[in-house]
Each structure stands twice: as C-alpha cells, then as structure tokens.
Image (spheres, rainbow, N blue to C red):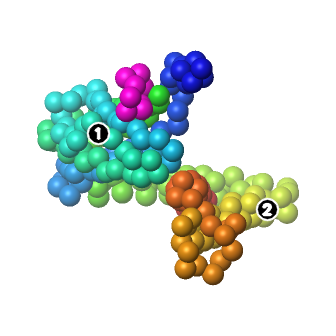
Amino acid sequence: MQQQKRQPELVEGNLPVFVFPTELIFYADDQSTHKQVLTLYNPYEFALKFKVLCTTPNKYVVVDATGAVKPQCCVDIVIRHRDVRASYFGVIDKFRLQVSEQSQRKALGKKEIISTLLPSAKEQQQQKEEEEKRIKEHLSESVFFEQTLCQPENRTASSGPSLLTVFLGIVCIAALMLPTLGDLESLVPLYLHLSVNQKLVAAYVLGLITMVILRT
C-alpha cells in the first residue's frame, strides 16, 4: 500500500527544489567570480540525493556534482568556470539540478540555473546604470503628463513597497528570532517554538521579499 501511494509522486516529478542563486554570472576580468557557489536546501523530512547536469560540461568544473543532503539541511555546490574566452561572452549555459530519494533512481524534482560569462563587471554596471537612467527618464516624462490629469492616483502608485509586503517581512523576521524546537532553556512558550523546516521556509520567503523591496 505504501508503494502505491508514493508511485504517483515519483512519476510526476514535481517536488519543489530550493536552490540559491538561480542565476550565475561570471566576469572575465574578475577572477574572484570564476568560482561560484550554489546552495541546495532540503526542507523535507527525508534525505535527498542530487545530481548536477550541464549543457556545456567542458566549460565548467563542478565540485561534488553528485551527493546527498540530510533532512532539513543544506549543502554548497562549487562551480568553477575553466574556459574563459571572448567567444563565450554573452553565451547562456544551463545547469540542471535533479533531486531524488536515496532509495530511488527517478528524479522527484529539478531546477534549472542560468550561467552567463560577461567581459567586465564595470562595463556591465555602466550599461545597467545607463539603461536604468533611460527608463527613469521615460517614466518621469510619462508620470509628468499623467499627474496633470490624475495626480492623487499617481501618489499611491509610487509609494514604494506595499504594507502587505512589509508585514510579511516582519513576520518572517519574527519567525527566525523565535527559538527552535528542542531549546529547553528558552522562556518562550513551547507552542511558539518552530522547527528547522519552518525556519528554512521563513528565510527563503524573507529573501524573496527583500528582492521585491529592493526592486521597488
């Protein structure tokens, strides 16, 4: 009966995979960026084994391309770019991180990570600043004409992150500050103690909220 219940999950392969970051950027003029680290999180109650695949394996060295992650733990995967040349500038490569149970071969879930080699971090930053400047100039003109028609609505539209986003961020911070299950010396009531799994989810959500706030 247990095998029949688990079989649909193995066939679907829709287990969420938590990995950060989801994009790798290497800069040819900065050797410190030629080594990147992927962190794989396992918030589940069972151990996972993982495998790292790549569309262009000759360009990269993956330290520990296969391995295992204990329940409610994480592991770092080091990726080095070993073939830095001008002909690869701007070319998008992909890594695929597959996870499965240690007793199974079929992948329960997968996550793709984009990898790009750029010539210079300074040039990229300048291009990004110029692009942001053009966007701001365009938006400032568009907002100017709209304000002559409906100024009160534009005030609310450009007020920054929403109260709901800020509230969720505060809740995640509070969750991370609460004691962990098994901490007997804490004075906080037992029903407020959180598991490691819950804290990992709170940290992951807090990271997403931080990215949203920084982009507003």
Callout 2: 10 Å neighbours few (<14), some, many (20+)? few
Compared across the picture, whether 54 is left or right of 197 comes to: left
Residue at x 70%, y 66% (from the top left corner)? 191
Q: Which of the image's four quarters has the C terminus?
A: bottom right
The answer to which image quadrant residue 143 occupies is bottom right
Q: Position of residue 53 (x, y in %)?
A: 30, 30
Pick the front one: 50 or 90: 50
Pick the front one: 113 or 6: 6
Please say if 75 is above or below 189. Answer: above
Q: Which residues are magenta?
A: 100-107
Rendered image: mark on residue 11: none
Query: CB atoms at circles 1 and 2 under 8 Å apart?
Result: no
Residue at x 54%, y 53% (from the top left corner)? 197
- Labels 1 and 2: the sequence-earlier one: 1
> Is 55 in the magenta?
no
Residue at x 22%, y 41% (from the top left corner)? 64
Q: Is residue 97 visible?
A: no
Dominant secondary structure, magenta: loop
Quote the CA–CA distance across marks 1 and 2.
50 Å
The residue where tag 2 is placed is 156
The residue where tag 1 is placed is 67
Please say if 24 is above or below 13. Answer: below
Residue at x 17%, y 55% (from the top left corner)? 31
> Is 104 in the magenta?
yes
Q: Which of the image's four quarters has the N terminus?
A: top right
Q: Is residue 150 visible?
A: yes
Q: Secondary structure at mark 2?
A: helix
Compared across the picture, whether 137 is left or right of 61 comes to: right
